Image: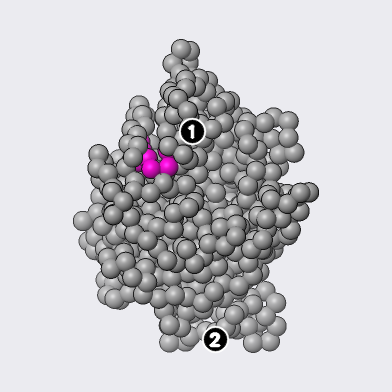
Amino acid sequence: MTTTTATRMLWRGLCIIVPLLFVSVNCQPLDKSAGDGNLKNKGIAENIVSAETNYKGKWELFSPNSGVSAMHLILLPKTNNSLMFDSTIFKTSRLKFPDPHCQNVVIPNGPVEEHCFAHSVLMDFETAKVKPLKFKYDTWCSSGALDVKGRLVSTGGSDKGSDTVRILDKCDDCQWKEYPGTLGNGRWYSTQVTLGDGRFMVFGGRDFPTYEFVPSEGHRNSKNQVIDFKFLRETRDRVENNLYPFVNLHTDGNLFIFANNRSVLLNPKTNLIVHEFPVLPNGARSYPASGCSCMLPITLHPDEKRPVIPAEILVCGGAAHDAFTLTDLNRPKVFPPVTKDCGLIDISEMQKANWKILQMPSPRILGDAMVLPTGDVLLVNGAKSGSAGWDDARDPNMVPVLYNVASYNFKELNPSTIPRMYHSTSAVLPDGKILIAGSNTNDGYLDVALFPTETRVEKFSPHYFDPALDPFRTEILYEKAKRLNYGKPFKVRVRGGDQNLDMKKLQVNIYNPPFTTHGISMNQRMIRLGIYEVKKDGAEKDVSVISLQAPLNGNIAPPGYYMLFVVYNGVPCRRAMWVNVNK
């Protein structure tokens, strides 16, 4: 009996007899029609073989001072740049512009002021070199995504920044371009999503239960281009709990939208809700309850012909509906324990879809759910009690947790020594390490506080950096840029791994780097590509050629830049290759 088969039998028994580790709202049997006992419409294939390891990861202090607290974080393609920024409301930071080059900042209900402290930086994620950037309109609690050219398009923020659209190109010398008055509504704590045609939509925000399409550069939305969204009005409770909704593009072109404890599918062409899913129990999950969420990897077959590709959503952590009231509005503050469970749902099931409830090793709020190059999920950062907000959380959760999507298992990894709570962020790097930054539980930059404002930056090396697994680490041999055309075949050349790469141990995954803030990773997306064959390169004996098919369309993989990872025996390649997916 193989390890994989034994695992499936164990889970089947647990589901029937003692559902202690895997508790389900509707404990569904495994569907043998999917082949070899797989769960029907499983997000990532279970037949992939991975090497076993007990290695629990390694932390390193990458930089003692990023200059700004990384409230927002994203990687810029084809560079070594990670963009970090917070808010001009703080006025000071830990990085000054070279005198006398200060920035002009628009002050709420006031004049333009000159600030000499940076609130936006490019950090080289290999050298830790920092370059300050200037912006004028406040980015506090904004949203964003990469466009088809690899530029960051950022929307919203606070006060006069709330209707602003900003663009930052991916070059080392690029500066912010700002377009105030672009959006029809102010967008503070809103979520931006990329559609299959590359356009952006932005949902919600404080006091605005609406959505709109983000206009092209230089254009503006009028009020009649804003669409009222009854769902966001219905999910708003006394402390909101529906801000920064979790929004994901389904593979059929509809949008999965989760707010508070409810979720729907919205057709962005007709503006109609086509399906509402069951309520996820045990409290609220979006801001300020601030659980975390991700779409699990989308698995493709070679010569893909399925009309709808399965997609699963994972929602982890959160808090009671009244948690913000108890912590932020109550005196003295009360810090209730937060949620320990995760909800998992296959949104392609539609009428059959139901939440499966899984128990994490520990409760978590304010965390990040990062999809690793292997397709598994890393839960990192956060707290065990309280709520989002200034000084509203306690008991930092410094133990990252690995969620194995094939077995539903959770595994605790080595802890950090730095609390990362409110306003902390994470990013998956091309070498497979995780960049972790931020944490500001204070209204301002404070050195003397229960949890001081954090500008140290760490890197975490997950389990697959076990030195014993290094022989399985491949190297991609590539040009500086590669374009993948929808549905077309292409090849990737790799060196290393076994003498003959075993198809059962091989994955080739493309990953869209997300815009991460407030526990939400906007547009995070991984697609496991269909592999036609693997052959040895005739000229070089240690080189293999992998033949693959690009995703069929933009609903599966919205156009733009992705990191391509070759994963062999559960070990990612030494460095991902940037690819542009397009028509």
- Residue occupying image coordinates x 51% and y 65%: 235
Residue 259 located left or right of residue 52: left
How far is disc 1 from disc 2 in space, using C-alphas?
A: 56 Å
* Crowding at mark 2 (Cα within 10 Å: few <14, some 14-19, many 20+): few
Pinpoint residue 361: horizontal percent, then vertical percent. Answer: 69, 63
Q: Is residue 314 magenta?
A: no
Pinpoint residue 58: horizontal percent, then vertical percent. Answer: 64, 46
Mark 1 belongs to which amino acid? Pro
Q: Which of the marked residues, 1 or 2, is nearer the chain's N terminus?
A: 2
Q: Which residue is mark 1?
A: 108
* Crowding at mark 1 (Cα within 10 Å: few <14, some 14-19, many 20+): some
Of the pair 63 and 275, the residue shown nearer to us: 275
View extreme (front): residue = 109
**Segment tinted magenta in the rendering:** 161-169
Of the pair 573 and 75, the residue shown nearer to us: 75
Q: Is residue 164 magenta?
A: yes
Up the image or down, 233 lies above or below 288; here it is: below
Helix, strand or loop under label 1: loop
Q: The N terminus lies in which quarter of the figure?
A: bottom right
Residue 463 located left or right of residue 517: right
Q: Which residue is mark 2?
A: 29
Of the pair 487 and 548, the residue shown nearer to us: 487
Pinpoint residue 167: horizontal percent, then vertical percent. Answer: 34, 38
State the scheme by which the image is colored.
one colour
Pinpoint residue 253: horizontal percent, then vertical percent. Answer: 31, 66
**Which of the 4 image quarters holds residue 440?**
top right
Up the image or down, 571 lies above or below 457; here it is: below
Mark 2 belongs to which amino acid? Pro
Up the image or down, 434 lies above or below 107; here it is: below
